[in-house]
Amino acid sequence: AWEQRKLGEVAALAKGNGYSKADIRESGVPLFLYGRMYTQYEAKVEQIDTYAEPKPGTVYSKGNEVVVPASGESAEDIARASAITRAGIALGGDLNVIYPRSLVVPVFLAYGLSNGSNQKLLAQRAQGKTVVHIHAGDLESLRIDLPPIAEQQAIGSFFSRLDDLITLH
């Protein structure tokens, strides 16, 4: 049975740190910037093609987090999410980082936050006029619908395969 939970009950939240487009280099640590979410929409991020020199205080991926933009031009712009499936990627500033606990499959959460009723609820939490923002505190109280883990894995896997198929054609 599906159950409704607050995101803050099933995940820890943090913020990316200290990188912008100006930090991109030919080599260094793999870097995920929020702008990529607007140019290469991916529900599941496995490969990175941007790099930067490491900085103190960098937030690195563990390979099971979900990122949501912290700002954008509209509420709809920031109502999207990507699962980072690889460890060791520097997570740039202007990203909310969600660390799902054992009840949540990251890829399922990314698809869920980017589509349907959860996407609408996420967009409603955005604040601002010219530039809209969403903060970790806004995300913590977001109510999400969760099926059992096996069902989350099956749903996430299904949509990932569909995305892969679309990318091929």
Image (tube, helix red, strand yellow):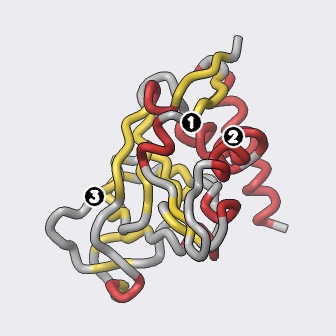
Q: What's the amino acid at mark 3?
A: Val
Mark toward the start of the polypeptide (2 vs 1): 2
Q: Quadrant of residue 3?
A: top right
Q: Nearer the viewer, residue 7 or 52?
A: 7
Residue, disc 1: 142
Residue, disc 2: 118
Residue, disc 3: 59
Alpha carbon of mark 2 to alpha carbon of mark 1: how far?
A: 8 Å
Q: Is residue 95 left or right of residue 106?
A: left
Kindly indicate whether the residue at mark 1 contacts the one at mark 2 (C-beta within 8 angstroms): yes
Q: Is residue 102 visible?
A: yes
Alpha carbon of mark 2 to alpha carbon of mark 3: how far?
A: 26 Å
Q: What's the amino acid at mark 1?
A: Leu
Q: What's the amino acid at mark 2?
A: Asn
Which disc number belongs to residue 21?
Answer: none
Mark toward the start of the polypeptide (2 vs 3): 3
Q: Is residue 150 left or right of residue 140?
A: right
